Amino acid sequence: MKFRNDVLALDDVDLRILGVLQEDARRTYTDIGKHLGMAHSTIYDRIKRLEKYGVIRKYTTIVDPEKAGAKRIVALMTVYTDPKDSETVAEKLCKAPEVLEVYTSISEELLVMAKVVAEDQERLHAFIANSVAPLSGVLRIRTSVITKKFKETSFSIFNGLTKSTLKKQTRNIGERKKNER
Protein backbone atom coordinates (compact mmCIF):
# COMPACT_ATOMS: atom_id res chain seq x y z
CA MET A 1 0.00 0.00 0.00
CA LYS A 2 1.39 3.35 -1.07
CA PHE A 3 0.18 6.87 -1.58
CA ARG A 4 0.30 8.29 -5.08
CA ASN A 5 -0.73 11.94 -5.43
CA ASP A 6 -2.35 11.76 -1.97
CA VAL A 7 -4.48 8.79 -3.09
CA LEU A 8 -4.13 5.40 -1.43
CA ALA A 9 -2.91 2.80 -3.93
CA LEU A 10 -3.26 -0.86 -2.99
CA ASP A 11 -0.71 -3.31 -4.34
CA ASP A 12 -1.26 -6.95 -5.33
CA VAL A 13 -0.50 -8.19 -1.81
CA ASP A 14 -3.09 -5.85 -0.27
CA LEU A 15 -5.66 -6.99 -2.82
CA ARG A 16 -4.97 -10.66 -2.15
CA ILE A 17 -5.21 -10.13 1.63
CA LEU A 18 -8.54 -8.36 1.15
CA GLY A 19 -9.76 -11.20 -1.06
CA VAL A 20 -8.89 -13.80 1.58
CA LEU A 21 -10.57 -11.75 4.32
CA GLN A 22 -13.70 -11.29 2.22
CA GLU A 23 -13.96 -15.06 1.83
CA ASP A 24 -13.48 -15.68 5.56
CA ALA A 25 -12.64 -12.83 7.95
CA ARG A 26 -12.09 -15.32 10.79
CA ARG A 27 -8.80 -16.56 9.33
CA THR A 28 -5.76 -15.91 11.47
CA TYR A 29 -2.76 -13.84 10.39
CA THR A 30 -0.72 -17.05 10.36
CA ASP A 31 -3.26 -18.86 8.19
CA ILE A 32 -3.45 -15.97 5.72
CA GLY A 33 0.35 -15.77 5.67
CA LYS A 34 0.64 -19.49 4.87
CA HIS A 35 -2.02 -19.16 2.18
CA LEU A 36 -0.18 -16.24 0.54
CA GLY A 37 3.35 -17.47 1.28
CA MET A 38 4.19 -14.58 3.58
CA ALA A 39 5.13 -14.06 7.22
CA HIS A 40 2.23 -13.57 9.64
CA SER A 41 3.87 -10.35 10.87
CA THR A 42 3.67 -8.92 7.33
CA ILE A 43 0.02 -9.86 7.14
CA TYR A 44 -0.63 -8.30 10.55
CA ASP A 45 1.08 -5.04 9.56
CA ARG A 46 -0.77 -4.86 6.25
CA ILE A 47 -4.18 -5.53 7.81
CA LYS A 48 -3.59 -2.95 10.54
CA ARG A 49 -2.68 -0.38 7.88
CA LEU A 50 -5.78 -1.27 5.82
CA GLU A 51 -7.87 -0.76 8.95
CA LYS A 52 -6.13 2.51 9.87
CA TYR A 53 -6.79 4.06 6.45
CA GLY A 54 -10.41 2.88 6.34
CA VAL A 55 -10.04 0.34 3.56
CA ILE A 56 -11.31 -2.28 6.00
CA ARG A 57 -14.25 -0.61 7.73
CA LYS A 58 -15.46 -3.48 9.90
CA TYR A 59 -15.75 -7.22 10.28
CA THR A 60 -19.28 -8.56 10.30
CA THR A 61 -21.52 -11.61 9.99
CA ILE A 62 -23.88 -11.99 7.06
CA VAL A 63 -27.18 -13.46 8.24
CA ASP A 64 -29.69 -15.08 5.90
CA PRO A 65 -32.94 -13.55 7.20
CA GLU A 66 -35.12 -16.27 5.69
CA LYS A 67 -33.15 -19.07 7.34
CA ALA A 68 -33.18 -17.12 10.60
CA GLY A 69 -36.98 -17.07 10.44
CA ALA A 70 -37.41 -13.35 9.82
CA LYS A 71 -40.63 -12.63 7.96
CA ARG A 72 -40.23 -9.61 5.73
CA ILE A 73 -40.76 -8.20 2.29
CA VAL A 74 -38.15 -6.32 0.34
CA ALA A 75 -38.94 -3.65 -2.22
CA LEU A 76 -37.01 -1.42 -4.57
CA MET A 77 -38.37 2.09 -4.42
CA THR A 78 -37.72 4.70 -7.09
CA VAL A 79 -38.42 8.23 -5.90
CA TYR A 80 -38.72 10.87 -8.60
CA THR A 81 -37.64 14.19 -7.13
CA ASP A 82 -37.37 17.85 -7.87
CA PRO A 83 -33.67 18.24 -8.82
CA LYS A 84 -33.00 20.79 -6.08
CA ASP A 85 -34.32 18.40 -3.40
CA SER A 86 -32.85 15.05 -4.43
CA GLU A 87 -29.86 15.14 -2.06
CA THR A 88 -32.08 16.11 0.87
CA VAL A 89 -34.57 13.33 0.06
CA ALA A 90 -31.71 10.80 -0.18
CA GLU A 91 -30.24 11.94 3.15
CA LYS A 92 -33.62 11.69 4.90
CA LEU A 93 -34.19 8.19 3.51
CA CYS A 94 -30.79 7.15 4.88
CA LYS A 95 -32.05 7.84 8.40
CA ALA A 96 -35.05 5.50 8.15
CA PRO A 97 -34.48 2.04 9.66
CA GLU A 98 -36.65 0.48 6.92
CA VAL A 99 -34.17 1.62 4.26
CA LEU A 100 -31.22 -0.68 3.61
CA GLU A 101 -29.55 1.14 0.71
CA VAL A 102 -29.91 4.54 -0.99
CA TYR A 103 -28.58 5.68 -4.37
CA THR A 104 -29.07 8.64 -6.67
CA SER A 105 -29.09 8.46 -10.44
CA ILE A 106 -29.59 10.79 -13.33
CA SER A 107 -31.47 9.56 -16.36
CA GLU A 108 -34.18 11.70 -17.96
CA GLU A 109 -35.04 12.74 -14.42
CA LEU A 110 -33.24 12.86 -11.11
CA LEU A 111 -33.96 9.68 -9.19
CA VAL A 112 -33.41 8.45 -5.66
CA MET A 113 -33.46 4.67 -5.46
CA ALA A 114 -33.77 2.77 -2.21
CA LYS A 115 -33.93 -0.83 -1.08
CA VAL A 116 -36.60 -1.02 1.60
CA VAL A 117 -37.61 -3.75 4.02
CA ALA A 118 -40.86 -4.15 5.96
CA GLU A 119 -42.63 -6.86 7.95
CA ASP A 120 -45.56 -6.96 5.52
CA GLN A 121 -47.26 -5.04 2.69
CA GLU A 122 -49.34 -2.97 5.09
CA ARG A 123 -46.23 -1.68 6.89
CA LEU A 124 -44.47 -1.06 3.59
CA HIS A 125 -47.43 0.99 2.39
CA ALA A 126 -47.55 2.91 5.68
CA PHE A 127 -43.83 3.71 5.48
CA ILE A 128 -44.12 5.00 1.93
CA ALA A 129 -47.34 6.95 2.55
CA ASN A 130 -46.34 8.45 5.90
CA SER A 131 -42.55 8.81 5.66
CA VAL A 132 -41.56 9.09 2.00
CA ALA A 133 -44.44 10.71 0.09
CA PRO A 134 -44.65 13.77 2.40
CA LEU A 135 -40.95 14.63 1.95
CA SER A 136 -40.39 17.99 0.29
CA GLY A 137 -39.34 17.54 -3.33
CA VAL A 138 -40.89 14.10 -3.87
CA LEU A 139 -42.80 14.16 -7.16
CA ARG A 140 -43.83 10.50 -7.43
CA ILE A 141 -42.83 7.08 -6.15
CA ARG A 142 -42.66 3.71 -7.89
CA THR A 143 -42.27 0.64 -5.72
CA SER A 144 -41.44 -2.87 -6.91
CA VAL A 145 -41.84 -5.65 -4.37
CA ILE A 146 -39.18 -8.35 -4.77
CA THR A 147 -40.92 -11.68 -5.36
CA LYS A 148 -37.92 -13.90 -6.07
CA LYS A 149 -34.20 -13.39 -5.52
CA PHE A 150 -31.87 -14.88 -8.13
CA LYS A 151 -28.60 -13.42 -6.93
CA GLU A 152 -27.47 -11.33 -4.00
CA THR A 153 -23.83 -10.65 -3.35
CA SER A 154 -21.77 -7.98 -1.73
CA PHE A 155 -18.80 -6.15 -3.20
CA SER A 156 -15.67 -8.21 -3.58
CA ILE A 157 -12.27 -6.75 -4.27
CA PHE A 158 -12.12 -9.25 -7.14
CA ASN A 159 -15.52 -8.46 -8.73
CA GLY A 160 -15.02 -8.09 -12.46
CA LEU A 161 -11.58 -9.71 -12.53
CA THR A 162 -11.26 -12.87 -14.57
CA LYS A 163 -9.61 -16.02 -13.25
CA SER A 164 -6.72 -15.51 -15.68
CA THR A 165 -6.14 -12.01 -14.25
CA LEU A 166 -6.13 -13.42 -10.72
CA LYS A 167 -3.74 -16.24 -11.70
CA LYS A 168 -1.45 -13.71 -13.39
CA GLN A 169 -1.45 -11.52 -10.25
CA THR A 170 -0.72 -14.57 -8.11
CA ARG A 171 2.13 -15.64 -10.42
CA ASN A 172 3.60 -12.13 -10.40
CA ILE A 173 3.64 -12.05 -6.60
CA GLY A 174 5.28 -15.49 -6.50
CA GLU A 175 7.90 -14.46 -9.07
CA ARG A 176 8.75 -11.28 -7.16
CA LYS A 177 9.18 -13.24 -3.94
CA LYS A 178 11.61 -15.63 -5.69
CA ASN A 179 13.57 -12.72 -7.15
CA GLU A 180 13.81 -11.07 -3.73
CA ARG A 181 15.50 -14.12 -2.23
Image (cartoon, rainbow, N blue to C red):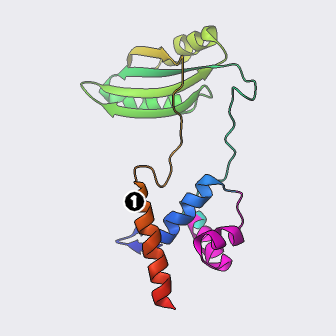
Q: Does the magenta portion include 38?
A: yes
In this view, the residue in front, 115 or 169, is 169
171 lies left or right of 52: left
Residue identifier under label 1: 164
Looking at the image, is 128 positioned above or below residue 48? Answer: above
Q: Position of residue 22 (x, y in %)?
A: 59, 54
Q: Give the residue furthest to the top.
A: 122
Q: Which residues are magenta?
A: 26-50
In the rendered image, residue 87, in percent from the top left (x then y), is placed at: 40, 33
Q: Does any portion of residue 54 appear in the rendered image?
A: no
Q: Residue at x 51, y 27 (%)?
A: 150
Q: Secondary structure at mark 1?
A: helix
As for residue 78 lying within the magenta part, the answer is no
Q: Residue at x 60, y 25 (%)?
A: 98
Q: Main secondary structure of the magenta part?
A: helix
Q: Residues within 10 Å of mark 1 (few under 14, many from 20)?
A: few
- Can you say whether 62 is above or below 69 in the image? below
